[in-house]
Image (cartoon, helix red, strand yellow):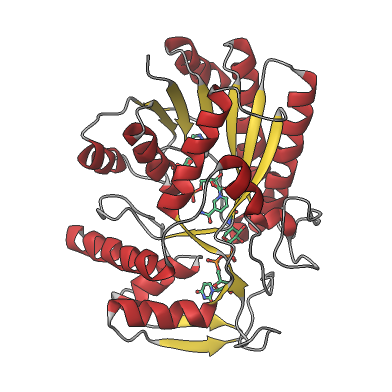
């Protein structure tokens, strides 16, 4: 019988791509999302790609009772918990919203997993837990740094909540995936990132500038201690990232875990500068991007990229898609969106 996975935040950016990869790998998926940062039409995109209709429940993970009804209705083999608020700047302005949403949602999930005998949790963590590391690239052994934003702190605290829960409750186990910078879109351009308002992240700002929605891209700083002076990140294709979740679910449901709480870096292992992203985007999409160098953005770290060896060797997962292909997919998705608007 096909295994069934609850995907919270499944209409969101990473959740929708993961849903597609799960369906294509033969899993059944049920989505829970409160649509606070996504749209119902994403479900249509998922259906167009996979030919499958996914059961969807508009439920807030903070609502233990309604979330409990979903757990009672299905027999889940695993949960992938994406649902969270993720805007760093907003989290500084509204810390309680972030602590409430990200911590309560996770605690409700863990409570219901125990109550309904769902043993396996994949959790969305982030490279934000490393802050500016002293040594690059960062491995899972690199010490976590004190978070620089309430958002980052929620990821740090969620990892601790999971670690303590798994230690206390033998009936549950978890894999936390620390994502680096997910970018790009499904090659079909049926799903992708849907920023609301002015994008905070680099790639949606780049594609909206190329589309003429934004007049100019600001590159935040060219005076960092990096080869071209701009910041360095590890940009991971969202489909590659989605596949890491499928591998993690498989590892858990097949009883292959070596510890009951495992943590993996999910990145390419390659650091790329902001200016390199801009130039590559121009080259692969054959266009000119209007950009200017401005001052540093408060809170930005200079450089971070992953050592993904543990995921490569232990999960058997590796990022496969090139930056060229990924930036082509981002532009194709932007054009698809423009066509719809
Ligand atoms: P997203 O905002 O596109 O997706 C999150 C989804 O969760 C949205 O559809 C939103 O409506 C939903 N949601 C939020 N709170 C909810 C709640 N209380 N109940 C039900 N649904 C709720 O974000 P994303 O980029 O897909 O991120 C998914 C996860 O990955 C998040 O936990 C995020 O913190 C983490 N993450 C993202 C990045 C990134 O750069 N995108 C990097 C590292 C980690
Ligand atoms: C990337 C680079 C900017 C916009 C954030 C969160 C982090 C994680 C991933 C969830 C930086 C530069 C950006 C622009 C620019 N999310 N930039 N002009 O800051 O690495 O990480 O998303 O866990 O927690 O902090 O991603 O896409 O915002 O920026 O020059 O208009 O692009 O300075 O160097 P970041 P980003």
Q: Position of residue 67 (x, y in %)?
A: 51, 21
**Quadrant hosting residue 54:** top left
Q: Position of residue 88 (x, y in %)?
A: 61, 58
Front in this rendered view, residue 303 or 83:
303
Left or right: 341 with respect to 273?
left
Q: Residue at x 60, y 19 (%)?
A: 119
From the image, which quarter does the N terminus lie in?
A: top left
Residue 244 in view (yes/no) = yes
Of residue 170 and residue 155, the one placed in the foreground of this image is 170
**Residue at the location (60% across, 22% down)?**
255
Q: Is residue 94 visible?
A: no
Is 57 displayed left or right of 66 in the figure? left
Q: Going by the image, does 27 lie left or right of 297? A: left
Which of the 4 image quadrants contains residue 40? top left
State the quadrant of the C terminus: bottom left
Residue at the spot 20% in from the left edge and 41% down from the top edge: 48
Q: Is residue 17 above or below residue 64?
A: below
Q: From the viewer's perspective, is residue 185 above or below residue 207?
A: above
| Figure disc tally | 0
Rendered position, 82 above or below 111:
below
Pinpoint residue 236: horizontal percent, then vertical percent.
50, 59
Name the image quarter holding residue 194.
bottom left
Residue at 81% x, 56% y: name it. Answer: 146
Q: Position of residue 187 (x, y in %)?
A: 29, 56
Foreground residue among 296 and 272? 272
């Amino acid at each position: 019988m096909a295994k069934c996975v609850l995907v919270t935040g499944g209409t969101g950016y990473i959740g929708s791509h993961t849903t597609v990869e799960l369906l294509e790998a033969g899993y059944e998926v049920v989505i829970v999302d409160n649509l606070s940062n996504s749209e119902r039409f994403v479900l249509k995109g998922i259906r167009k790609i996979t030919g499958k209709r996914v059961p969807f429940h508009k439920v807030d993970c903070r609502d233990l009772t309604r979330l409990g009804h979903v757990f009672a209705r299905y027999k889940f083999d695993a949960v992938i918990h994406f649902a969270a608020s993720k805007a760093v700047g907003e989290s500084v302005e509204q810390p309680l919203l972030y602590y409430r949403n990200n911590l309560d949602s996770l605690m409700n999930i863990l409570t219901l997993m125990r109550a309904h005998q769902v043993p396996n949790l994949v959790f969305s963590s982030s490279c934000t837990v490393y802050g500016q590391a002293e040594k690059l690239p960062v491995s899972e052994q690199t010490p976590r740094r004190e978070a620089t934003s309430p958002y980052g702190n929620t990821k740090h605290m969620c990892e601790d909540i999971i670690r303590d829960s798994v230690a206390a409750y033998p009936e549950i186990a978890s894999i936390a995936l620390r994502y680096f910078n997910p970018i790009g879109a499904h090659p079909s351009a049926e799903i992708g990132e849907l920023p609301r308002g002015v994008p905070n992240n680099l790639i949606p700002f780049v594609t909206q500038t190329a589309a003429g929605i934004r007049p100019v891209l600001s590159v935040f700083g060219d005076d960092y201690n990096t080869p071209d002076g701009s910041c360095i990140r590890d940009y991971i294709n969202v489909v590659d990232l989605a596949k890491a979740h499928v591998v993690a679910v498989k590892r858990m449901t097949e009883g292959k875990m070596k510890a009951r709480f495992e943590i993996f870096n999910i990145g390419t292992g390659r650091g790329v500068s902001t200016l390199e992203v801009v130039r590559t985007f121009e080259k692969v999409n054959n266009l000119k991007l209007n950009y200017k160098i401005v001052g540093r953005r408060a809170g930005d770290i200079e450089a971070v990229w992953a050592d993904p060896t543990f995921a490569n060797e232990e999960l058997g997962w590796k990022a496969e898609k090139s930056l060229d292909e990924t930036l082509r997919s981002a532009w194709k998705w932007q054009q698809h969106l423009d066509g719809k608007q």
